[in-house]
Image: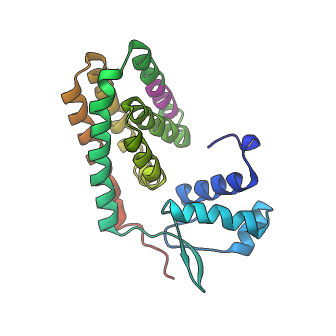
Amino acid sequence: MNDIRHLTLRERIYEEIVRMIVSGELPSGAPLDEKALTEKLQVSRTPFREALGTLSKEGLIEIKPYRGFFVRSFSKKETEDLYELRKTLECFAVELAVPQMSDRHIANFERILDEAVAALKADDMVAYGQADREFHETIAELSGNAALIETLSRLALQIQIGRTIANESHTFAEDAARERDDILAAFRRRDIKTAAALMHAHISDVQRTVLARFEEVKPVKR
């Protein structure tokens, strides 16, 4: 999350609601109690609803006329489709990014992965998730493809929810860290084909973990 001292009121509300959704404090399908949340956040209805409008456009909040606001529920099919799209987009990002990578870029990836490992050792899964997200976002940025970067950015919060579910398993997180080390090794060799294949396998592992958990996490009845 960004430092809230540099955010507008609407942005601060947005960030806090995202945190509650990603952490599971506001679970899938849950209604948003406007009165309770505005009191908790100590804000008025206008900026609160502006923040929800943004989240609705990003696919995390559903606005139902005469019923209110709800955390969006993703069906198993929607979740599977999201990860199939993510594999295509991120593998394409790798193919475009690898030729652009300098030694400085490689060093930055090493820093990110070192931070991820340190977070794992400290059992700090929030910091681990942040490093994980930075790793993938940095690859997208290096692709230099504005349309690709924008598309992945629009999907980022939906992907983050899946990432949070997967990272609840410490064993999975350790395996994922090793997979990213393999990807980094391919980056060092500037081996585009291997790096893309490893990224595809990595996201497939996340997909399987999230879908396996899907049956365990039942949406809130409305």
- Residue 128 % position (x, y): 50, 37
Nearest the viewer among 118 and 190 is: 190
Q: Is residue 57 left or right of residue 177?
A: right
Residue farthest to the front? 146
Q: Is residue 148 left or right of residue 22?
A: left
Secondary structure mostly seen in magenta is helix
Toward which corner of the image does residue 39 lie, by quadrant? bottom right
Nearest the viewer among 209 and 75 is: 75
Is-magenta flag for residue 162?
A: no
- Residue 12 % position (x, y): 70, 52
Residue farthest to the bottom? 66
- Residue 105 % position (x, y): 42, 19
Residue 216 in sight: yes
Name the residue at 30% across, 31% down. 96
Is-magenta flag for residue 114?
A: yes
- Residue 109 % position (x, y): 42, 24
Name the residue at 41% across, 39% down. 146
Q: Is residue 182 left or right of residue 222?
A: left
Q: In this view, does 124 lie to the left or right of 218?
A: right
Toward which corner of the image does residue 80 lie, by quadrant? bottom left
The colour style of the image is rainbow
Relative to 181, residue 54 above or below: below
Which residues are the magenta region? 112-119
Nearest the viewer among 197 and 174 is: 197
Nearest the viewer among 88 and 23 is: 88
Name the residue at 37% across, 36% down. 145
Name the residue at 47% across, 31% down. 116
